[in-house]
Amino acid sequence: FPDLAIGAYKSNYVTVLSSRPVIRSHFRIITYPSSLSRNSTNFIIGVCVNQTKKGKPVQQ
């Protein structure tokens, strides 16, 4: 996972912020017709987006 380290020059200190994914996204693009000619003036594009929560549920 992409972590971030923050420090100051000659300070001898560094902080590391660890990360983890919390949302998983899936994208799908559909076109009709599937291929277009140069003279095409009409086409249809469909976009599907699905997002799911990832990780442990938060206890309150």
Image (cartoon, grey):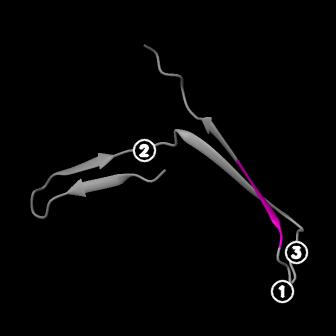
> Of circles 1 and 3, which is in front?
1
Secondary element at image label 1: loop
Task: Say which mark, if any, is on residue 35.
Answer: 3
> Of circles 1 and 2, which is in front?
1
Residue interval drawn in magenta: 42-48
What is the CA distance from the residue labelled 1 to the residue labelled 2? 46 Å
Q: Farthest top residue?
A: 60
Marks 1,2: beta carbons within 8 A: no
- The image quarter containing residue 44 is bottom right
- The image quarter containing residue 6 is bottom left
Verify whether residue 58 appears in magenta: no
What is the CA distance from the residue labelled 2 to the residue labelled 3? 40 Å
Q: Amino acid at mark 3?
A: Ser
Quadrant containing the C terminus in the rendered view: top left
Secondary element at image label 2: loop
Secondary element at image label 3: loop
Verify whether residue 45 appears in magenta: yes
> Of circles 2 and 3, which is in front?
3
Task: Say which mark, if any, is on residue 19.
Answer: 2
Label 1 sits on residue: 38
Depth check, front residue: 21 or 41: 41
Depth check, front residue: 60 or 39: 39
Does 45 sit left or right of 59 as displayed?
right
Residue 55: x percent and y percent?
Answer: 55, 31
